[in-house]
Amino acid sequence: MSASHWGFILASYLVCAGVIGGMILAIALDYRRLRRDLARLGGLREHQDDQA
Amino acid sequence: MNHLPRELPFPTARNRPVDMLKYANPTLFLGLVARLVPWLAGATAVTLAVGLWGAFFAAPADYQQGETVRIMYIHVPAAWLSTFCYATMTASALGTLVWRHPLADAAQKAAAPIGAAFTFICLVTGSLWGKPMWGTWWVWDARLTSVLVLFVIYLGLIALWRTIEEPSRAARAAAILTLVGVVNLPIIKFSVDWWNTLHQPASVFRLGGPTIAPSMLWPLLVLALGFTLLFLTLHLLATRNEILRRRVRRLSIQAATGGSNEAPAHRLSATGATP
């Protein structure tokens, strides 16, 4: 087994972590932007009530 | 505004059918998400940690592939999730077309980028696994090509939602395209049986049981469970965002029309507003 194959293994796990991390970040940033928009439009109280 | 009770008990054997229907209400769904997500996120983290420990420290190297087999522990769960996510979207598409439920459309739209991401992981890790094992990054074999088609369908659906401005028209078009694309799922599953492919045949979900060694199977199944929990967590959060996006849209329309509700009733329903 060539030691150079660890590069392929590492790259696979890095791609996986990067994509999943990117997804989580995108969803979190989207949520923050939506809450800001809701606050601007006066709908944030309704959302907070829904979460209660 | 919604006048339904906000506090609902978790379903019991006695009240389950009624309460599960109540959770299909967008407003009650948001409350459910707020309660479920912390538990799901914790379970996801623990399951993934155990699975990764098993993949790197408990599972042995393969007698033919050596250490490279460790790519399998993320490639295979990502592949399963890419089709599971599409199956979820198909169920949501039926909910949109048959019952015209606003939550079904939101769930379908929220699942598409997640499904595309898992399919992308599957394709890239498969390529990184194929280069040292097959000697090539890519071959146009039936399994690889059908998964690539799935990825293109995901991208097409995302583009469709962004292209059509009217939400109800976009929902119908995306639901129809999703139902057309579902024919690709059995092709992906059985491509390795129907055609002579470079990709190996099924070794876990097959008649006669798994052919993979138990010491390698359990980390794979634990990571598959972890990926599934991750999908559920992200899908719930993305669906919540989609409901909020529709509320923002509804409030923007109301603000633009001076507070009067000039949008048609069916559109208000589709934006997450409740009676």
Image: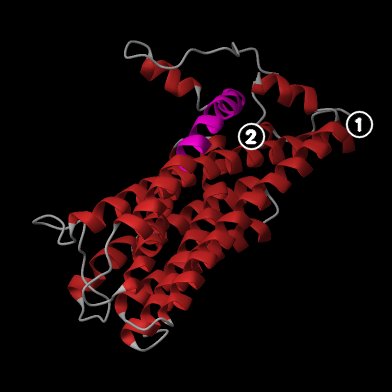
Query: Residue B198, percent across and down?
Result: 26, 81
Three-letter amino acid code at the position of disc 1: Gly
| Residue drawn at point x = 72 percent, y = 26 percent | A47
- Residue B40: numbered disc: none
| Residue drawn at point x = 38 percent, y = 59 percent | B56
Across the whole image, how many numbered discs are drawn on residues?
Answer: 2
Chain holding disc 2:
B
Name the element at disc 2.
helix
Query: What secondary structure characterizes most of the magenta part?
Result: helix
Farthest residue, direction left: B208
Q: Find disc 2 in the rendering and name its residue.
A: B266
Q: Find disc 1 in the rendering and name its residue.
A: B258
Highlighted magenta segment, given as a residue range: B25-44
| Residue drawn at point x = 65 percent, y = 23 percent | A51
Direction from residue B242 to residue B189 in the image, left or right: left
Q: Can residue B169 be seen in this view?
A: yes
Is B93 or A24 nearer to us in this picture? A24
Q: Do the residues labelled 1 and 2 touch (CB within 8 Å)?
A: no
Direction from residue A40 to residue B219 in the image, left or right: left
Query: Residue B105, percent across and down?
Result: 54, 43
Is A38 or B215 nearer to us in this picture? B215
Query: Residue B152, percent across and down?
Result: 50, 70
Magenta run includes residue B194: no
